Image: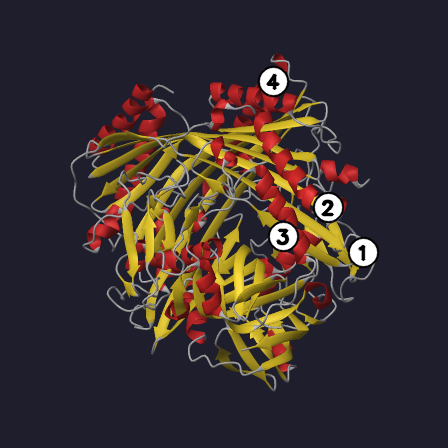
């Protein structure tokens, strides 16, 4: 699509919206290409290519928003979407008791893209299928499995953004991901493993030492096999060392959502009135950022055209901030944080996370294991659920016992549960090494907008008082 | 806009996509065309948000022999549709053969359409906000224990069409109305939530939604800890038991996991899997149910399948491909759109609406028969973490009550509830008489189970 044509349509939306009486207009064009390949038991179960392309218009009238969208890229359709958005904002304004207006700022003109060495669009379907085949072969080399599944996913495209500040932003989202799943069913026992994750990179990601198909598939087979000899985990409140993966999901799902400012200003979050208060131990520092030196998701601008930065949510246990869009930041007299995100043009941006993680500590892995002494090393999870009061439950599908300061036996699937606001008080340290990941498979599901890629990870974190196993 | 205009629109797009596919030399193709108007208005503690638009798109499967490729595009612009067809074709050509693939639907047989409410087509955003007001009016804002409320009303109308190069050209339409309210209340540092919602094919009376959401939250205040660990009976209200059983039966009824030999009930056909009072039917034809349609999403007429009769497993649910692989007929259970718009996914087997038959006593009568047990009033967290192979589950209940000597004595703080799905179907103590039509994928009356492990 020609850039000039798109910018012209978006500027028309801004102009038409303002002429209709809107105080402020944001117009964006998303053109995203998504590909999924799934090979199960050597059968190509899915080979899908999705193209999402369209324009979304947000209108603000006296601080009341209205959102509309169209997949049609012509002036008539864009005008209609704009009139709908303005109409919604105006017609609901009299009922809106929480107006979230914001100051105009100096417009931004920017074009950014990540450094991609092997862009997925430059490679054939068979190149990607070959990656899966290599991963599955590696599973089989490492275990005598009952079934295998290899999945590959890619997302790339372009995003254009224009608003009443005369901002014009163009940026390029990209990510690739591959997962390898193995199942062994033997004598009434089932063992299962899932390995792999994604990155905002091109296919060069699968040439890195830790993420080659051979490494990912090999680990999946190995971890699946060792599950057959797994022992029952201890139950009850247990000192736990959580991996970057596990800690990342816990901090995203259980804490991150509570810090989203739309939940805060409406009183839904239990940390709504606790800014400056002590939430956790001195070892708890929680960060949310758009482009991180640790990897994860590449996310330079949010869907309100705000440049993303590094937000400190919790600093040494003290709550320091929330995740804002422009309206909530203005209402709460805070800096914008670039957290207005929408999954595609059919949805309005809402406050959501970028790359969220516990900040590093000062321990080595060995020191962390030693410090736990006796407990559980929780590495990976599959599925879970959280509630807005901070209660969570995650299914740990890969973990080990820690006995006398050493990692010993693998444990069977078990549940990790608790309340994050209690748990943060029991964080006892973190390792020096931080790893961030992202993914095409899974993601954040707030407000029916699933799955939105986010970045997650962190260091390994020692948490005491984690409820393992639930009821037995 | 009229229903027949909607139908004509999706059929026309499906027909032109198939014509283009044929003209381009595509050997076999299936076009799934989706067109749905959405209009949402919500009030989050006074903060109003609204969204209005048309979700439109096409998903195309192309088969070259048994090699299948899929592509989708948003919108109905001809160039986008042509690109999607060409993309699906090029993927199919280099794809691996799927030995189970058995072609696309070749006829235009349809079943009954669900109820369509013409009033939904004409609702405008201002009228939707009146529904918000109706729910809001039931909430006593002078009660300082109410910290926040979240209220929403959503309408959907539209439909889909399936066209194939083999001769299918069929469509189905739907209207849907959803309203919900959730509340957060707090007292002396204790915080509780409650919610209520309705989903239907027509505009529904919203009486009680705001009131119920607040009452559910308030009822949870003053919670006490459940001491120790005990094996007890648990009485589940209709909504939470529908979620509980839905998670289990959605997988256990799956014809794909049956064919792939990963279904724990795979060897149990015509065997007892539940107590004799337990009867389950998958009903894609009741005009009131939200998922009822004249065709499924690959063009097969939706149907009604007896899955469990008197506790005996009678059938799994199938689409065309897995039905053929199992030497059975399709049951019209090809569904799309999990985690995104329907046109972006290929068909997968999912239940239409599973109905658990009403049997005996209402929930008060069930509670009255319990000497010591637990009442579950909202969906526990962790249902999806059950071990699908062994059936073991362990969940956390945040809205439960202690029952003693036939009476509810007090709300409980979060507690664990564990058991085994396969065992629990045989540990059903009572099946209630109080199932109502809801929008849930599984609709059950209240149920009392024996032998759940409860720990505080």
Q: Nearer the viewer, residue B55 or B11?
A: B55
Query: Could you tell me which secondary element the residue under label 2 belongs to?
Result: helix
Alpha-carbon span between mark 1 and mark 2: 13 Å
Instruction: Give the image quarter of residue B360.
Output: bottom right
Sequence-wise, the earlier of marks 2 and 4 is 4
Which quadrant would the C terminus of chain A be assigned to in this image? Answer: bottom right
Q: Nearer the viewer, residue A334 or A189?
A: A189
Instruction: Give the image quarter of residue B142.
Output: bottom left
Q: Which mark is residue B16?
A: none
**Residue linked to disc 4:** B21
Q: Chain of mark 4?
A: B
**Residue linked to disc 2:** B255
Alpha-carbon span between mark 2 and mark 3: 29 Å
Q: Are marks 1 and 2 on the same chain?
A: yes
Where is residue A160? Give x, y as percent.
Answer: 32, 30
Instruction: Identify the residue at image location x=28%, y=58%.
Output: A265
Alpha-carbon span between mark 3 and mark 1: 31 Å
**In this rendering, which labeled residue sits more in front, label 3 or label 1?**
3
Sequence-wise, the earlier of marks 1 and 2 is 2
Q: Which mark is residue A223?
A: 3
Instruction: Identify the residue at image location x=75%, y=68%.
Output: B426
Q: Which mark is residue B268?
A: 1
Where is residue A354? Give x, y as percent.
Answer: 36, 46
Q: Nearer the viewer, residue B137 or A319?
A: A319
Instruction: Identify the residue at image location x=16%, y=44%.
Output: A103
């Amino acid at each position: 699509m020609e850039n000039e044509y798109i910018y012209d349509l978006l500027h028309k939306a801004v102009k038409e919206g303002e002429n209709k009486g809107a105080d402020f207009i944001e117009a964006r064009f998303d053109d995203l290409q998504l590909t999924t390949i799934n090979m199960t038991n050597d059968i190509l179960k899915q080979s899908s290519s999705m193209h999402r392309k369209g324009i979304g218009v947000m209108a603000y009238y006296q601080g009341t928003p209205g959102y509309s969208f169209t997949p049609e890229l012509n002036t008539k359709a864009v005008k209609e979407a704009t009139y709908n958005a303005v109409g919604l904002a105006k017609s609901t304004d009299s009922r809106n008791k929480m107006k979230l207006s914001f100051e105009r700022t100096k417009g931004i003109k920017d074009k950014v893209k990540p450094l991609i060495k092997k862009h997925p669009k430059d490679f054939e379907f068979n190149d990607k299928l070959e990656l899966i085949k290599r991963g599955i072969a590696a599973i089989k080399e490492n275990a005598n499995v009952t079934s295998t599944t290899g999945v590959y996913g890619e997302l790339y495209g372009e995003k254009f953004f224009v608003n009443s500040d005369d901002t014009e932003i163009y940026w390029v989202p990209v990510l690739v991901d591959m997962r390898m799943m193995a199942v062994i069913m033997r004598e009434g026992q089932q063992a299962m493993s899932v390995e792999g994750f994604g990155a905002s990179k091109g296919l060069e990601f699968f040439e890195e030492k830790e993420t080659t198909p051979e490494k990912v598939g090999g680990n999946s087979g190995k971890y699946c096999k060792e599950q057959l000899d797994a022992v029952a985990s201890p139950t009850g409140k247990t000192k736990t060392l959580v991996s970057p993966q596990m800690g990342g999901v816990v901090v995203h799902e259980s804490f991150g959502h509570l810090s989203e400012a739309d939940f805060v200003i409406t009183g839904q979050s239990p940390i709504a009135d606790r800014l400056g208060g002590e939430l956790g131990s001195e070892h708890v520092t929680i960060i949310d950022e758009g482009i991180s030196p640790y990897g994860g998701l590449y996310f330079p601008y949010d869907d309100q055209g705000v440049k993303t930065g590094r937000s400190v949510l919790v600093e040494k246990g003290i709550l320091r901030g929330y995740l804002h869009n422009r309206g909530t930041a203005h209402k709460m007299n805070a800096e914008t944080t670039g957290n207005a995100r929408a999954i595609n043009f059919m949805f309005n941006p809402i406050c959501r996370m970028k790359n969220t993680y516990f900040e590093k500590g000062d321990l080595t892995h060995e020191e962390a294991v030693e410090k736990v002494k006796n407990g559980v090393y929780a590495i990976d999870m599959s599925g879970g659920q959280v509630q807005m009061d901070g209660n969570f439950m995650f299914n740990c599908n890969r973990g080990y016992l820690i006995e006398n300061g050493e990692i010993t036996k693998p444990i069977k699937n078990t549940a990790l549960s608790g309340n994050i606001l209690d748990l943060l008080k029991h964080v006892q340290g973190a390792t020096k090494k931080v790893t961030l990941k992202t993914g095409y498979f899974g993601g954040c599901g707030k407000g029916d907008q699933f799955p939105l890629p986010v970045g997650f990870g962190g260091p390994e974190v020692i948490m005491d008082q984690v409820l393992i196993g639930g009821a037995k | 806009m009229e229903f027949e205009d909607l139908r004509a629109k999706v059929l026309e797009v499906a027909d032109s996509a198939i014509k283009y596919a044929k003209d381009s030399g595509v050997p076999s193709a299936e076009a799934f065309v989706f067109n749905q108007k959405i209009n949402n208005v919500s009030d989050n503690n006074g903060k109003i948000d609204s969204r209005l638009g048309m979700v439109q798109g096409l998903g195309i499967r192309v088969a070259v022999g048994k090699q299948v490729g899929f592509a989708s595009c948003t919108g109905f612009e001809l160039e986008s549709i042509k690109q999607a067809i060409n993309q699906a074709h090029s993927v199919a050509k280099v794809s691996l053969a799927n030995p189970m693939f058995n072609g696309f639907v070749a006829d235009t047989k349809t079943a009954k359409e669900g109820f369509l409410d013409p009033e939904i087509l004409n609702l405008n955003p201002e009228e939707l906000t009146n529904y918000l007001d109706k729910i809001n009016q039931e909430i006593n804002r002078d009660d300082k224990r109410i910290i926040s409320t979240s209220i929403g009303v959503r309408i959907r109308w539209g439909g889909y069409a399936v066209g194939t190069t083999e001769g299918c050209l069929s469509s189905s339409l739907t209207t849907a109305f959803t309203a919900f309210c959730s509340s957060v209340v707090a007292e002396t540092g204790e915080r509780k939530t409650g919610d209520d919602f309705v989903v239907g094919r027509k505009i529904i009376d919203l009486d009680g939604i705001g009131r119920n959401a607040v009452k559910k939250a308030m009822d949870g205040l003053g919670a006490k800890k459940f001491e120790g660990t005990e094996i007890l009976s648990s009485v589940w209200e209709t909504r939470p038991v529908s979620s509980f059983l839905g998670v289990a039966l959605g997988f256990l009824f799956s014809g794909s996991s049956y064919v792939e030999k990963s279904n724990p009930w795979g060897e149990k056909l015509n065997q007892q899997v539940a107590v004799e009072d337990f009867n389950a039917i998958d009903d894609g034809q009741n005009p009131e149910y939200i998922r009822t349609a004249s065709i499924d999403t690959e063009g097969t007429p939706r149907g009604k399948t007896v899955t469990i009769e008197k506790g005996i497993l009678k059938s799994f649910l199938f689409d065309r491909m897995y039905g053929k692989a199992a030497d059975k007929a399709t049951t019209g259970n090809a569904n799309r759109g999990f985690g995104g718009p329907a046109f972006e996914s290929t068909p997968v087997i999912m239940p239409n609406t599973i109905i658990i038959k009403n049997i005996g006593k209402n929930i008060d009568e069930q509670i009255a028969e319990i000497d010591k047990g637990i009442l579950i009033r909202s969906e526990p967290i962790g249902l999806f973490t059950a071990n699908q192979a062994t059936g073991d589950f362990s969940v956390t209940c945040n809205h439960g009550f202690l029952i003693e000597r036939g009476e509810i004595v007090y709300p409980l703080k979060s507690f664990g509830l564990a058991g085994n799905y396969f065992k629990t179907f045989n540990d059903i103590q009572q099946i209630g008489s109080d199932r109502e039509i809801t929008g849930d994928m599984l609709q059950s009356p209240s149920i009392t189970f024996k032998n759940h492990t409860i720990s505080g």
